Amino acid sequence: MMRINSEHVALGLHNKVLKLMEQEKKGRVLDAPAGVGNLSCYLKERGFEVWAADIDETVFKASEVRFQMVDLNKKLPYPDSFFNYVICIEGIEHLENSYHLLREFGRVLKQRGKLIITTPNVLSIFSRLRYLLIGYCDFFGGYYSRETDLYTSHINPVGFPELYSALKKGEFELENIATNRNVVFTRKFPLKLLLWILIPLVKMVTRIKVKDNFMCRRLLSSELLAGEILILECVRR
């Protein structure tokens, strides 16, 4: 199987998603957006029937995988209850309407079908500090905002509460939250120390201000406080 190494993906993200998929029965999976096609190739190797989709057909390089040009801002060109799985790696932050996307994913998934969706964790302690200091979440704006830079197209910083609300509107149940890596451990010592000092303060204020027990527990989890990329496993009701 062809290997494509030109795709920029957060460290460890594909491996974590593939480990989650290894626990699942083989079936039809939509990989959208597919990018250059690395994840599509890995899934096909493991016996899944892969349908890849992306808005830019010139980027996709995995010629042995079925591909269709698709604008995720619009209605998906697939029948109702068509897929067993949908995987959306680093896509929702590029789109104008998160609720529309998740409703469409819910429509094309079979009942009890699984969605795995990832997005930059804008509520990590590092992202919150960055927003406080320069007004931009991690992976959004600031030194990423040059026209030629990779992250210029990140237009929709979706925090966990907003994403959870959109998932419920799309008829999804949240099963699990994971992350690709701990963002605090990756920082140099002075910044790492500051982040560790801030975490107890954030926990204290969250417990005081957030009255919903479910949301409070999620916001205080290590995945949300320290994770770089959020990985959500969801099941269509």
Image: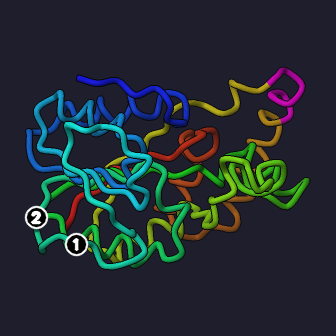
Residue 148 versus residue 107: which sits nearer the camera?
148
Residue 99 versus residue 216: which sits nearer the camera?
99
Q: Main secondary structure of the magenta part?
A: helix
Residue 217 versus residue 138: which sits nearer the camera?
138
Secondary structure at badge 1 equals loop
Crowding near pointer 2: few (<14 within 10 Å), some, many (20+)?
some
Query: From the viewer's perspective, is 40 left or right of 90?
Result: left
Residue located at (44% from left, 40% from top)? 178
Query: From the viewer's perspective, is 214 left or right of 34?
Result: right
Check disc 2 and report the residue beneath it. 82
For the C terminus, give its image quadrant: bottom left
Question: Is residue 172 highlighted in magenta?
Answer: no
Residue 123 versus residue 151: which sits nearer the camera?
151
Secondary structure at badge 2 equals loop
Check disc 1 and report the residue beneath it. 77
The magenta span reads: 188-194
The residue under label 2 is which amino acid type?
Phe
In this picture, is 186 found above or below 164? above
Distance from label 2 to label 1 (Cα)? 11 Å
Query: From the viewer's perspective, is 126 left or right of 183?
Result: right
Labels in figure, total: 2
In this picture, is 117 found above or below 213? above
In the rendering, at what x and y percent does residue 202 appear?
74, 51
In the rendering, at what x and y percent does residue 47 appear?
10, 32
Question: Is residue 189 highlighted in magenta?
Answer: yes
The residue under label 1 is which amino acid type?
Pro
Quadrant position of residue 195: top right
Residue located at (36% from left, 34% from top)? 38
Residue located at (82% from left, 22% from top)? 188
Q: Farthest front residue? A: 58
Residue located at (23% from left, 23% from top)? 1
